[in-house]
Image: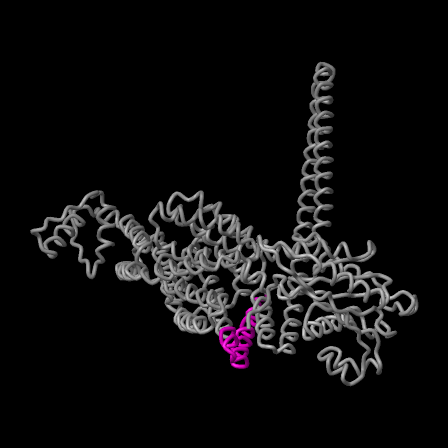
Amino acid sequence: MYRNVILQDLNLDFLLVVLNRTGIDKVQVCPSLGPLRWMVIALFALASALPLPGTAGQTDLDRIDAIYLLAENNTRAALKEVEALGTTLGPQTPYVVRRKYFMARIELEIESAQMDAAAASVAKLLSLALEQKDDIGLILATAADASLMTSAGETGAAIAKLAKLAPLAARITDFETLSYYFRVLSNAQIAVGKFEAALDSALKALHNAEQQEKYGPQARLKSMNTLSNVYSAMNNPQKALEILNQALTLAHQLGLKGMLATLYLNQGGAFSSLGQTDEYMAANERALKISRESGQKQTEAVVLSNIGDSWLLKRNYRKAELFSRLAMDKYKETGDQSGFTTAQANLGFALMGQGKVDEGAAQVRQALKVQHGAEDISSEEGVLAELGKMYEQAGRFKEAVASIREQQSLSAQLFKAERERTVAALQEQFDTVQRQKKIELLARENTLKDSEIRNQQLQQTVTILGTIVTVMGGIFVFYLYRRARDANLKLSDANKQLEFHSVRDALTGLFNRRAFLDIMQQRPRDVTSLRREDDSPDGLLVLDIDHFKCVNDTLGHGAGDAVLVEVARRLRLAVRESDMIMRWGGEEFLVYSPKGTALHIKNLAERILKVISQAPFNAGGQSITVTVSGGFLCLPFSGIPETECNWEKTLQIADMALYLAKLNGRNRVCGVVHLLVPFAEALPLLESDLTAAIHANMIEIVEVCGPPLDALAPRLAPKD
């Protein structure tokens, strides 16, 4: 018995896939047959291979499999086929088929930028799963909804929704569902800067993908792509590139074209972080070509945004503006608010680079407002840093300082959150060890009780056996004791290493911001009762490498890292053993000199300027001259109690002195040594405009200039 099948607007690629599914391995086309006869033959073969009505559910599952295969090469055609399939399904269709149909439709609608349609499909799947009381369907629908929320900038709410599913996800064993759930969770965690949690989720997604029997390679590729995104967000582009290269090789081997655009897109991001601009452009061009051919609008929008970013790196601001506007239009079409704000920020930077500073800054500020509302602190901090650089490039130093202050505030928030996560992880590790000890203790007690019961039952006839059991129990206890002791020793060593690395900069080996904050927290709130300013004050000297961005842009980030390491080494040569050097952030350093008078800090600044510029640096195989600029103050400042002018305000004024040194020509250090007017009167200008404070005769300032530089010495500086 056979049934008639009516196929309307059947895609040729899809037909070939279905024929292959029916067992027809080879199709030969006779030149003498026209297209209509060829189609009739194909339909006859298809109808002959279709099963009886009793196996309709399996036939629909096979058709969904074929749609997934078609989507690897043509998203538009796959979406048409899944929509056509939907018209044939009804309440009598097996639930598993309808669940799989909705997931295929949701994924294709998202990739085709039909977000409203995807949201409607998610609602239908959720209703169906609740009706069937199906945990797998509930997880799939909720995760898909969270993915849409993340794209719309509602990341915090998306993570909260996924967190509620954690107990449910722990109970199921469906690898395909778990891989999808952890991929969505990892992407949301990346957006809010929870990188350690995102890495854990991405690794779980990859583990579950490797256990899948069906769609295993596709799920593995998607999980590897998510894992590369985590490493990129954690500033480890080399590891991200390694994973992406493996994924690209696998995608080419399997002919999975649908993932190539996304993989090339993220490969470009890794190249950008490594300073390989040409490779970055080439990867984006490949991704753009593939995404347009396969109708992946979401991926196309991201690629256009990245190309705009690459033109920003090359300082071709007109092309950057063009591609940023194209990306914004495409993001509007897809409904991706997060991507839209990124492209809008790039548009603002492009306009600022063309001299339209106020117009561009307005675009950037609008993007920052959206990121702030979405609690995307990591992206907000990066945009503020770039905004400060663009203001400085335009000569708008006051606005640059304000932007940097905002960035520093967000950096402090990120640092605090990271520290809290680390403490929580350590606490969890400690609790796990304690739970394990309790389990071992209970096991030991049970063993002893069993021995006592057996001894009472066997009495004297089993005395020898009881002795043997006791001896073995002692050996077991000793073995457990040795294991517990070794575990404690390893935990102690790990804690010591963690404590060391928590206060040290990984690149330079110098103390980091946290080490200085710890010292300042231990400092008495009112030290004026303990010592006078001219008796034993503390010195704060802020230093910044001149034209460091040009080193990175011209010679690459590897050369920039080499310059940072060498500057750290030379600073150690210039300071006292009792002084403390910190890498404050980026190319900025802080020297804390206990019991250092203004004269001492002035002499220290002279030594530092000399030791930094006296010998060329080897950066990226090229010899260059490097200079620094700085600003210093003593703490307490000008006899003012620290309850009025604490170390944070003092450091802020030192920062302003640093920017004064930059304005006066760089390769110099400016120090504010005395107040000539009451502190309350001078404070507004001290925090915003030292030049005005000097002209108003409010402060006494000293300037230490570095050694004159050889005019022929190779130096890197921005081009006019």
In terms of depth relative to the viewer, which is nearer, 326 or 544?
544
Q: Where 101 falls versus 470 (above or below)?
A: below
Indicate whether residue 369 is drawn in magenta. Answer: yes
Give residue 699's quadrant in the image. Answer: bottom right
Residue 696: where, in percent of width, then height?
78, 85
In terms of depth relative to the viewer, which is nearer, 182 or 702?
702
At 66% from the left and 74% from the top, the residue drawn is: 401
Q: Which residue lies furthest to the left in this view?
A: 32
Relative placement, left or right, of 490 versus 148 is right
Q: Where 500 falls versus 522 (above or below)?
A: above
Q: Where 11 falls versus 487 (above or below)?
A: below
Relative placement, left or right, of 607 versus 60 is right
Question: Which part of the image, by quadrant, shows the C terminus?
Answer: bottom right
Evaluate whether residue 424 shows in this view: no
In terms of depth relative to the viewer, which is nearer, 214 or 521?
521
Residue 277: where, in percent of width, then height?
48, 60
At 45% from the left and 59% from the top, the residue drawn is: 278
Residue interval drawn in magenta? 349-377
Residue 460: where, in percent of width, then height?
74, 15
